[in-house]
Amino acid sequence: MRGRVHRSRVYRWRYGGRTSDRLLLAPQDIRTSDPVMANELFGGRFSLGGSVVVAGAKSPFELSPPSRAWQESLLGFDWLRHLRAADNEVARARARSLVADWIVRQGKFQLPSWSPEIVARRVISWISHSPLILNGANRNEYRTFMKSLTRQVRYLRRAASDSDNGQARLLSIIALNFAGLCLTGLPRLQRQSAVWLDQELTRQILPDGGHISRNPAILIELLLDLLPLRQTFTAREIPPPNALLNAIDRTMPMLRFFRHTDGAFALFNGMSSTPADALATVLAYDDGHGKPTGNAPHSGYQRMEAGSTVVIVDAGVPPPASASQSAHAGCLSFEMSTAGQRVIVNCGHPTIAVADWVLAARTTAAHSTVSIANTSSARFFDGGLVARYAGDLLVGGPRTVKIDRTENSDGIHLALSHDGYKSPFNIVHERILNIDPAGGTLRGHDHFEVGRNRSDPTYAARFHLHPDVEVSRMSGEDAVLLTLPSREVWVFTADGIDIEIEESVFLSEPNGAMRTSQIVLNGNVSEKPDIAWILHRVETGPRSDSAPEITEPREQQS
């Protein structure tokens, strides 16, 4: 129905009008480009969104997409940067041909090509790479391009308000700012879109620099657009909105906050494999190189850094429902890395979006925390009419997360709790984490506070391991050895509870899911409402291939 409306005369009338006749400037696209990818595009090979389609002589816009990610990338034209990197006439001709092909086939309002988020990405891509597309174009090709671009901008101006209140809405407003600055004849749009940008950045970028969705991946994507937008305001000699400058200044330090010792981002709330090239690009604009803060209260995260060890904890309530399409039920989960190696992780968001994996990755069991009665601490609106138009929203979940942080000569101490299991079990999960000043011992204590209407469910405390970690049992002892690629060894012990080693899956590898292991502590709330555990680094001696000398930590304290 909606597709037919988009093709109606009403839509054509509403989004028609005077065409901007030229472009004033082309913003810099700071995303990494690859001339090798250009050679593939010359041959009709489209490697996008984790999938590869060989179109050959056919138009890619008439093929059935292998995945939603591939389709969105194709229709967003972000791959034009690879053709621009080739910097030759063949690349320019190929770009003009593909843009013209899209205009003929899908340039007259049809979904999904005209969903606001895809239109926004396409507008940014076309404007940024307009020299590639228009260099060598004849007069008719130039006018056709400008007419289509203007129509998309006019559509986006009205449709942006229909976008959800998360990243899609902000991306639409960013695209309108690029259009207002770069196209002639749009002074009113330039002024109005700057006001919208100020309002939306103020709403979506939290005071500590996190995004309202709590998804670390969005910070990288936003900066890849906001940094060139700031440059474009400067090039037009127009003062950038204060919210734009503040958003960049606040967001940059959060990039360091989420980084592990190996440079990868922690896997929380939709974060997948870290795009190392994109991260390096935005970090090159970072003027501050100090130690990241340990407390991000508005975003709902905590960071503990001692010696060569980093622990990052999800300590926040779920985001607003409208921004929760990628949110996970991982409250009080943590990740740990040491000396350039991740040890304890969450399963992470799949790099290749298989529906079953995406939903499984969002459950509490896919995180290094405690799940009760094999349920999640938050629920998901998966499937149905709501999910079709708004995405798989997160509903319910913790309403209150308490945090008490102390730093002193004994190390860093975190006392946390969440009420995500208040209904239906009337249980509050409390977790204490303490790391010593040298970063060699991480102590944890999980406790279940049960209310009056006593329930007696089982629980599972999970510690998912990175695939590079070798796990084995210590002979004759209830302890587990974790051997890192550097041959550094850590020992995991738990007080009075059996330690199980089970299979797990690491979903955030660039090439797809990988098998890994997890440590699991199973119990019953009434029989054992307290779990005390320790991760302790072992002194291995001067030779990496020698047997580790086990040095026990001091007496367990709860």
Image (cartoon, grey):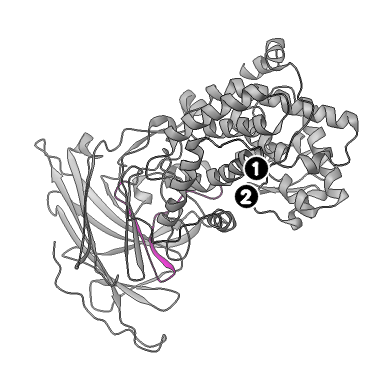
Quadrant showing the C terminus: bottom left
- Asked if residue 312 is among those painted magenta in the image, a careful observer would answer no
Question: Magenta stretch: residue 346 in it?
Answer: yes
Name the foreground residue: 252 vs 370: 252
Q: Nearer the viewer, residue 359 or 83?
A: 83
Residue at the limit of the structure toward the right, as seen here: 138
The label shown at residue 517 is none
Q: Which of 251 and 534 is in front in this view?
A: 251
- The answer to whether the residues at label 2 and label 1 have Cβ atoms under 8 Å apart is yes
At label 1, counting other C-alpha atoms closer than 10 Å, the crowd grade (few under 14, some 14-19, many 20 or more) is: some
Residue ID for mark 1: 70
For residue 332, above or below residue 438: above
Mark 1 element type = helix
Residue 22 screen position, x and y as percent: 78, 30
Which residue is located at x 43 percent, y 68 percent? 341
- Residue at the image point whose x is 48% and y is 37% from the top: 242
**Against 521, is 400 above or below?**
above
Q: Which residue is drawn at 68% across and 42% down?
A: 27
Toward the left, the furthest residue is: 452
Residue topped by disc 2: 50
Q: Position of residue 102 (x, y in %)?
A: 77, 32
Ranked by sequence position, the earlier of labels 2 and 1 is 2
Which amino acid type is shown beneath numbered disc 1? Trp
Q: Which amino acid does label 2 sit on?
A: Gly
Instruction: Point out the stretch of residues depicted in magenta.
Output: 331-352
Q: Is residue 380 left or right of residue 196?
A: left
For the N terminus, the quadrant is top right
Residue 31 pos. (x, y %): 64, 50
How far apart marks 2 and 1 lie (CA) works out to 7 Å
| Neighbour tally class for label 2: few under 14, some 14-19, many 20 plus, Cα within 10 Å | some
- Can the viewer see residue 83 in this picture? yes
